[in-house]
Image: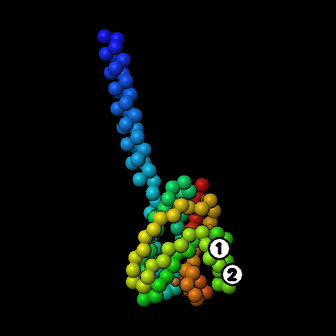
Amino acid sequence: MMKRTRLLIALVAVVMLIAACGDDDDAAADTNQQIATSARSFAFTPASWTVASGSDVTLTMTNTSDTDHEWVIMKAPIASEDEFTEEGVYWEVEALAGATASDSFTPPAPGTYQILCGLEGHFTAGMVGELIVTG
Ligand SMILES: [Cu+2]
């Protein structure tokens, strides 16, 4: 009798453990954040996004113009296009003219980051935004 009870408790524990693992997988999938923007010459709509640190973010950018555009997270803000360097880029995605691009990134440390289009003349033309990463 005692053995059967112990066996039953062990079985219940195993079932609960398996169920808990399943929940963790679901939670991980649920915490993948989604943001979107529409790119045209020369603006992002919207141009401000807020995400939480700690889980990956999928950006979907729809390019509605006949020119290629990029969505670039800068490590530190720049004041003019002369200051732009690839080394200053934290992460970027490009959507070709008329196409939609989607890719994922791990948010940088909490803070506010400058977003811009890195193609020549686009930052100067006003293609900028901000990404706010909360803690
Ligand atoms: Cu652009």
Q: Nearer the viewer, residue 13 or 37?
A: 13
Residue drawn at point x = 43 percent, y = 82 percent = 96
Residue drawn at point x = 61 percent, y = 87 percent = 124
- CB at disc 1 and ligand 1 closer than 8 Å: no
Mark 2 residue type: Glu
Lateral position of residue 8 relative to residue 28, left or right: left
Residue 109: image location, x then y, percent:
62, 59
Residue drawn at point x = 45 percent, y = 68 percent = 103
Report if residue 44 is visible in the image.
Answer: no
Q: Give residue 52's quadrant in the image.
A: bottom right
Q: Give residue 15's quadrant in the image.
A: top left
Which structural element holds mark 1? helix
* Mark number, residue 40: none
The N terminus lies in quadrant: top left
The answer to the question of whether label 2 and label 1 lie on touching residues, with beta carbons closer than 8 A, is yes
In the displayed structure, 40 sits above or below 21; it is: below
Mark 1 residue type: Gly
* Mark number, residue 88: 1
